[in-house]
Amino acid sequence: MRATIRDVAQRAGVGLGTVSRVLNNSPLVSPETRQRVLEVIDELQYTPNPIARSLSLGKTLTIAVIAPFFTRPSVVERLRGIEAALANSGYNLVVFNIESAERRDACLREIPRKERSDGVLLISLPPRAEEISTIKLSGVPLVLIDTYAPGLPYVVIDNKVGGYIATRHLLELGHQRIAYVSDPLEDPFSFGFTSSYDRYQGYRKALREAGIIFHENYHVSGLHGRYEARRLAHALLSQPEPPTAIFAASDTQAMGVLEAARDQGVDIPGELSVIGFDDIDVAEYLGLTTIRQPLFESGVRGVEALLNLINAAEDWTATLVCERLSVELVVRKTTAVPAA
Amino acid sequence: MRATIRDVAQRAGVGLGTVSRVLNNSPLVSPETRQRVLEVIDELQYTPNPIARSLSLGKTLTIAVIAPFFTRPSVVERLRGIEAALANSGYNLVVFNIESAERRDACLREIPRKERSDGVLLISLPPRAEEISTIKLSGVPLVLIDTYAPGLPYVVIDNKVGGYIATRHLLELGHQRIAYVSDPLEDPFSFGFTSSYDRYQGYRKALREAGIIFHENYHVSGLHGRYEARRLAHALLSQPEPPTAIFAASDTQAMGVLEAARDQGVDIPGELSVIGFDDIDVAEYLGLTTIRQPLFESGVRGVEALLNLINAAEDWTATLVCERLSVELVVRKTTAVPAA
DNA sequence: CTGTTAGCGCTTTCAT
DNA sequence: ATGAAAGCGCTAACAG
């Protein structure tokens, strides 16, 4: 069996508490004693048991992250940021991947509990009203990333501005018939609910300002993913008066649009302009014009905000942290002036 | 403060132990008592504290996974498999992302410890000899995924066969000048060390059987990633007698090759055939011919093997589980007969 | 400064 | 079948 704090104390000829003190860098221990204890620790290859530590401290020393995990490259990038920010914090990162509504509900019910984690990060999944109150009551700090909900701290980008910028870019090129391909805007379990919706708002705003009347059938939505987006784009391109530009709610969906265009022999950007959102890794490879958002950084910021809440003396729901990161238009090769 | 087992016992008018028994489905409790306890549990919204449970049990109820996490899509896919397989197991998944040699060493030193996790999954990173013995001594079951090491259980694909099949495909199309772009074959910290090397072996074998002499300068290697692969491919294509086909050790690297070809105006597959490895999501989108390996499944299998080891009565190093999943050639549009 | 002691919440003998 | 008690390894409060 591996060494415990008791073994160390015995071997060093000191009391249990003293060992604990050197372990926790308490100043209340003489240099000589500390030295001796340290030696024994080294000799015995002793490492404190985090579980026992947790139980005693009343902390779990873990951060939970709930995310529609690996289905989206953008989420993966946020996770990288989270992991990096947490790497030297002493907290462990435990992950929960959501790929079904049931699991979403189960996780939201079970994870935000004091005995499970000291804090939770919720990516892209907006909690429902009743879940919000449970969360607040639980006393476990939680911060949302890429989504928001009343009374909960969050880190987001300005999706509305993003949608606006994307649409403006198309408008400025001279496009009039601009379509929007997105996830379902109503379904609360659709992973990007709030962000897709906000981008839609920006899109509408840009159109309105340009004096362009929005046509219902220029907005199509379906489950996130390339295949579905491809299907939707096909429908869009088959309309009697097809759009000359398509704004996709994510790069992944933009890829589906690109595929559809290829299927139908539609030249890009000659006959159709396509702009995505996220600037994931492959976007550059594909030459996809897109709106870049700081994915990695959103993870880092989320962790920072969470850690602050955890260490704050007061009730974490008292101060509402809301961080809004900025976006940037990245023009590449899938957008151009419309065909004459 | 939230309810503890003691509160439940008191309220139900039973002993501490009894509550614990109903919690753990012990048959040693009368139906009526059980019923009553269950009611109180429900009433108090009691949930057992996993930390306390762990300490008492001497188990951590967590599985650690150490991986060169998000740099490779293939790793992400394996992680999805791991998460899925673990979802209803009662184990938590804590992840460690390796992006530097220091962190690799630190994790390999600190994670495989009884007080940290009940089992660890190590993806793509082969441990060094001295690390192997520490691991074995630690008593914590560990299984390797996508790599192997003496005396440690692992789940891999047959990389040698994969490399062989890929090369055969090119050979059968009529190619003679076939290059291989890979990660460094020697550097133990190169994330895909064993797999790239094994694929190389298969490549060499296929060439040998076909009676083709291998040219040193047809094998180039560099850090994993698209950019580096692109650079390497440029060099390859600039040789006096450039290859007519390139086998890339991963789809990501194949993308770099494709990019280089595009840069130089080399037509694919007309002037150059390219085959990748992994069949990651974008491969289909790109029409990339590749070798498909069951990434998700490798994660699932890894978990299964690990769970078996954890639950096995005997010393986990006693029985060596070695699982080898099969690969498959997926012909798409980046390979063809060489130009005449 | 340092040793001792009382829990943290749960599981598990050991009696009964 | 069930209650009482010991103990998992550690921290923190309490005496010195």
Image (cartoon, coloured by chain):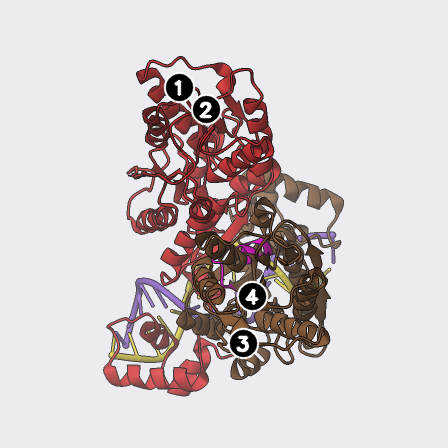
Chain colours: A brown, B red, C purple, D yellow
Q: Secondary structure at mark 2?
A: loop
- Amino acid at dot 3: Pro
Q: CA distance from mark 3 to mark 1?
A: 59 Å
Residue assigned mark 2: B244
Residue at 35% over, 45% down: B294
Q: CA distance from mark 1 to mark 4?
A: 47 Å
Q: Earlier in the sequence, mark 4 or mark 3?
A: 3
Answer above or below: position of C8 versus A269.
Answer: below
Q: Chain of mark 4?
A: A
Report the side of A335 relative to B283 (left or right). Answer: right
Res C6 → quadrant: bottom right
- Asked if the stretch drawn in magenta spans residue A304, the answer is no
B130 or A209, which lies in front?
A209
Report the side of B34 relative to B58 (left or right). Answer: left
Q: Secondary structure at mark 1?
A: loop
Badge 4 density bin: few <14, some 14–19, many ≥20, Cα 10 Å: many
Camera-near label (1 vs 4) is 4
Badge 1 density bin: few <14, some 14–19, many ≥20, Cα 10 Å: some
Residue at 59% over, 53% down: A270
Magenta stretch: give its range: A67-78
Q: Where does the image place residue B177, in percent across and percent down from the top left?
A: 43, 19
Residue assigned mark 3: A127
- Asked if the stretch drawn in magenta spans residue A72, the answer is yes
Query: Contact, CB < 8 Å: mark 3 with mark 2?
Result: no
Instruction: Specify whether disc 3 shares its chain with disc 2.
Output: no
Camera-near label (4 vs 2) is 4
Residue assigned mark 4: A243
Q: Check residue B176 in the rendering and tell me which mark sits there, or answer none.
A: 1
Q: Chain of mark 2?
A: B
Answer above or below: position of B222 versus A58.
Answer: above
Q: CA distance from mark 4 to mark 2?
A: 41 Å
